[in-house]
Image (cartoon, rainbow, N blue to C red):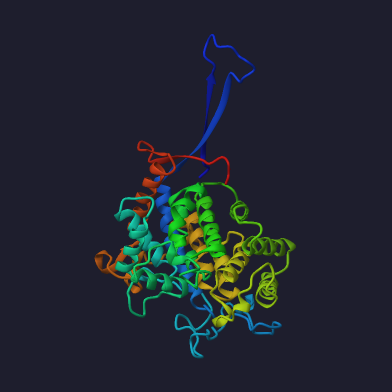
Amino acid sequence: MKPKVFTYAFLVLSILGCKNDNKETASLKETETISISRDTYKDQLYGFWLAQCIANWTGLVTEMDKIGNIGEIKTGDFYTRADWGKPDQPSIFSEGEPSDLTPTIDFVFRDTTEIWGADDDTDIEYMYQHLLATHETTLLTPEQIRDGWLIHIRPEEENYLWVSNQKAFDLMQEGVLPPVTGSPEQNEHFEMIDAQLTTEIFGLFAPARPDIAVKIAELPIRTVASQEAEDISKFYVRMYALASQPSEEKMSNRVLSIAQKARKSLPDTEYPAKMYDYVHQLYESGIPWEQTRDSIYQRYQVNEEDGYDITSQNLYCNGCFAAGINFAASLVSLFYGEGDLKETIKIGVLTGWDSDNPTATWGGMLGFMLGKDGVEKAFGKQFSNIFNIHRTRQNFPNDGIDTFEAIAEKGIQVTDRVVQEQLNGRIDAENNTWIIPLNTTHE
């Protein structure tokens, strides 16, 4: 649906009888607003949760299968498009066994008689939405985040926490509050990817306003991330906020356009901005995505260019789950997927490294842009609408069983509050729309 944009001009006149004195006697101020249907948005939030689950579980098939061997690339070091539909190879965690989700590299679905399980790419976002709704707030406090983690995350294994998230959780149990839990001084894993997984949804709570989206997401991001990893997470939040502005633009053009807008907020002197520019340049050159992926591996993991020095840190699996390499990998599927949901997921699955993360990120964003019906149309089938948050988390109502309809409705309630309290917008009850002032400075 094409956005309805209204412009209001307010002419401020000088008081009668006052002298001009070469000063302006009038000023013109413009405020643009956009109207967004709450019904349409609810359907889009459903699409976000559905497509994110599809992409997340499909990405898990190849998670950590191919991470490179720090040297010249050999045949088999990474997947290519020819591997789609072929037998899945073992991951570095699986002791020689392939994924038990599917024997071949293929989409993972849950049909209308089954239940989607939560995973670490969906469960913390679910928790944050729950906390925002429960506390009736738009800005979570350090104590609210700490208490939410301690209530809803299992203290013992298997608790589905990794690297920075696990360290932050350990610190919370010791009484440390965010954002210290994500600081380099306290959390040696602050560069790992976790903030990307946990905070993208904040972009959807601030439709068309990346500035406000980053504001409400900042403390949740800094709960587990710092420095470049923090900036990368803010990039994803901005992408989601920009994607939530209605548009009739072709999907491929729209995705690239919002990516370029989000890129402007990455500091030019840091490696994320240089990674973005490098991957975008290779995409624009017309080379295949596999060649771009191989170039990323050579440039950043072998040669350690642009200040990306993970290899020198001698981390387990060469930091295969670090924010940087996964950011670069995610851009491959974003650019080459060109707004096509299925193609974006397939490329993300085959690109390598922590492959469920980029797939979940872009699957969720594109699913939101398409809405429920658009996701189902893309795959030509209907899916389960039931979600079990207790697969990975605990202490939620109804023994953890929820529906995408109910989750989307709660997201609408959270967005209602953000629109009114943070965006200075309002709800048009008669038309069931939000009227949202835009940030015309384009931060």
- Residue at the extreme right: 285
Q: Position of residue 268 (x, y in %)?
A: 66, 57
Left or right, residue 153 beside residue 317: left
Kindly identify the residue that appears in the image at 37 percent across and 59 percent down.
Answer: 142
Q: Position of residue 151 (x, y in %)?
A: 29, 67
- Residue at the extreme front: 185
Q: Quadrant of residue 84?
A: bottom right
Left or right, residue 384 beside residue 200: left
Residue 65 shows up from this direction? no
Left or right, residue 164 beside residue 402: right
- Residue at the extreme top: 17
Q: Quadrant of residue 259?
A: bottom right
Q: Which one is in front, 44 or 153?
A: 153
Q: Which one is in front, 353 or 220?
A: 220
Q: Position of residue 218 (x, y in %)?
A: 46, 56
Count of labels shown? 0
Q: Which one is in front, 220 or 285?
A: 220
Rendered position, 243 above or below 182: above
Left or right, residue 134 beside residue 286: left
- Residue at the extreme left: 398
Q: Position of residue 152 (x, y in %)?
A: 31, 68
Rendered position, 377 above or below 120: above
Residue 191 shows up from this direction? yes
Rendered position, 299 above or below 27: below
Q: Which one is in front, 432 or 170?
A: 170
